[in-house]
Amino acid sequence: MSTAQEPPRVVVLTADGTPPPANEAALRALADVTVVTRDGLAAALAGTDGRRPAEVLLLWDFFSDALAEAWGAATGLRWVHVAAAGVDAMLFPALRSSGVRLTNAHGVFDRPIAEFVLAAVLARDKQLHRSKALQREHRWVHRELRRTQRSTALVVGTGGIGRETARLLRAVGMDVRGAGRTPRTEDPDLGTVVASAELAEHVGWADHVVLAAPLTAQTRGLVDARVLAAMPPHAHLVNVGRGQLVDEGALVEALRAGRPAAATLDVFETEPLPPDHPFWDMDDVHVSAHMCGDVEGWRDELAAQFEANLRRWRAGDPLLNEVDKDAGYVRSP
């Protein structure tokens, strides 16, 4: 909450100095807003740009590591909002151990990402990528397709994205289980939840393995050679979480060996994906540019979400989507 009589100073970090698109006027009515790029962040945080030190930072450029570099200047900072679901880039030790509060865009991307996963599952089962390739070659090749109804999916990650994905896959008749930190039965969205630490013991059940977990110390490299070797030969891996959830070198070798049979990847260890990466030329790997949640209007939703939380901050109400900095994600109520 802002305790000053005057509006709080809010610094907005963007890649190019352009304000958030939807509600710049509304934000300026609520706060003293300064839009900066990386080069101006330290001065704006410290107030050495001729204005007050910043209380609030909106990371619109949500992949930037500029805050870690400028942290020594953040003497008055009390709240950081990241306009993204993943906050792993923000959890550097100084921020994690500080009293600065951290919120994220929890909820904005749940349905769009779930729809992307469903599309990836259907495209695989119905051989849509293969059909397009044959069309380019002017070849008429009849094939039998996989039935999606009654097929199986293991959704790794039990947060909002994982839950919405499970609900959508169940809606088309799939048998869904979850994988998370705490195993349990009768979860309202995921049914049975197995321990993600024991993933290799459970992936053999799944036709589709969906990675929707946050990147934490526990999930980094979660899908390694052992897990990949345990997947069925026909299995399909979908990663909409973080590239670092997967050992990419092991995945390349596993795909070449035919286990799993295919992968749909929206996130990668290095982004943009280097032009010489093997994934580009693998027939059963489908690459998208870290965009699975970026539906039309997504920036407006992000801006409105921050505005609503800023109103709560000014009123002294609890902030929405506060991240547990030790866990690395927003805990369920």
Image: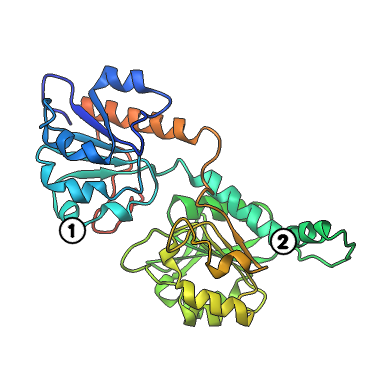
Above or below — where is 245 with respect to 159?
Answer: below
Q: Position of residue 108 (x, y in %)?
A: 45, 40
Q: In terms of image quadrants, where is residue 231?
A: bottom right
Residue picked out by circle 2: 148
Residues 256 and 323: in front is 256
The N terminus, quarter of image: top left
Secondary structure under tag 1 reads helix
Q: Is residue 3 left or right of residue 276?
A: left
Residue at left offset 88%, top offset 65%: 141
Q: Position of residue 223 (x, y in %)?
A: 46, 73
Secondary structure under tag 2 reads loop
Residue at left offset 81%, top offset 61%: 134
Name the amino acid, label 2. Answer: Thr
Label 2 vs 1, first from the N-terminus: 1
Q: Is residue 260 left or right of residue 302?
A: right
* Discs 2, 1 touching: Cβ within 8 Å: no
Residue picked out by circle 1: 93
Residue at left offset 31%, top offset 23%: 27
Above or below — where is 236 with respect to 45?
Answer: below
Q: Position of residue 220 (x, y in %)?
A: 37, 68
Above or below — where is 200 with respect to 41?
Answer: below
How many labels were placed on the picture? 2
Residues 277 and 237: in front is 277
Q: Is residue 241 visible?
A: yes
Q: Residues within 10 Å of mark 2 (few under 14, many from 20)?
A: some
Q: CA distance from mark 2 to mark 1?
A: 44 Å
Q: Is residue 323 left or right of residue 53?
A: right
* Comparing labels 2 and 1, the label whose residue is closer to the camera: 1
Name the amino acid, label 1. Answer: Pro
- Residue 299's mark? none
